[in-house]
Amino acid sequence: MAKYEFDEVKHRHTLDGKSLTGCTTILGVIAKPALIPWAANMVANCIKEKADFYHKPDSDINYYYVSEELLEEARTAHSKRKDKAGEWGTKLHAEVERYILNTMAIDGNAIDKTEYDPSISQFIEWAKRNNVKFLASEKNVYSEQMWTGGIVDFICEIDGKRWVGDIKSSGSGIYAENFWQTSGYDLMLQEMGEPPADGYLILNIKENGEFNEKRNISVEENQKAFLSCLNIYRTLEKIKSNL
């Protein structure tokens, strides 16, 4: 039997020492046009906030004097914001995992929010409101057939239905490919002998306190979309290796 391992430091999934491909890497073949204006806005805002401002008398014209140093800072403003968002996401996932594991130590059912970080208060309220029963948290999954690996944020039951869930901490919201990601996890879980999901669930928890939930029960369609992305990714790999 093949041996699966996960290196937390390198965030690397392997099977018999050979690297598996992560779901997010596979879904990288999908264009994300919303990121372009976001990055441009980060540059513009950095300059507007830090450049020397001058208003020309008797006119409606405003001038911004920008140094070479500020231009360099503006050029990397989007990556710094991304790093900060990553720190928030890491903290959020860790606290959610702690909460879910504590519920599973009892019976998996949602418990009160005592002693948990305020960042997950809405998550806890959502779990209690929907009578969520948690089945797994931060579960490592892999597929020898697809040669993929990943970590499922959580698996739960709501009203007797099984859901594969993922938590997004970005400010951009929830997109179709988020459900394709969870469908990839579902396919791996099934290959590992677990029952299929009845649907996929995405929670978007933003640093400013906003909370959003979306569910999708189009299981087969989402799996087809994920497998299409996987096919494109593997094809690109072959083409690049022959260039």
Image (spheres, rainbow, N blue to C red):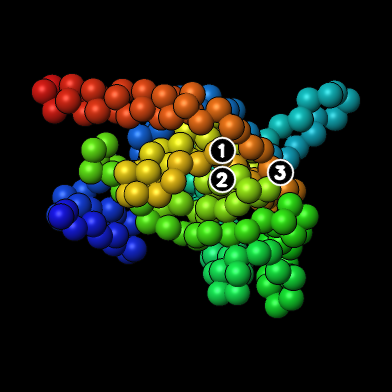
Q: Earlier in the sequence, mark 2 or mark 3?
A: 2
Location of the N terminus (image quadrant): bottom left
Residue appearing at x 37%, y 56% in the figure: 140
Residue with the mark numbered 1? 199
Of residue 205 and residue 195, the one placed in the foreground of this image is 195
Q: Is residue 19 above or below residue 3?
A: above
| Amino acid type of the residue that numbered disc 1 sits on in the rendered structure | Gly
Q: Earlier in the sequence, mark 3 or mark 1?
A: 1
Tell me the number on the disc at residue 212.
3
Of residue 229 and residue 51, the one placed in the foreground of this image is 229
Query: Are there few (<14), some (14-19), or many (20+) residues within 10 Å of tag 1?
Result: many
**Of all residues shown, which one is farthest toward the bottom?**
115
Of residue 49 and residue 91, the one placed in the foreground of this image is 91
Q: Is residue 98 left or right of residue 6?
A: right
Residue 84 visible to an observer of this rendering = no
| Amino acid type of the residue that numbered disc 3 sits on in the rendered structure | Asn
- Badge 3 element: strand
| Amino acid type of the residue that numbered disc 2 sits on in the rendered structure | Trp
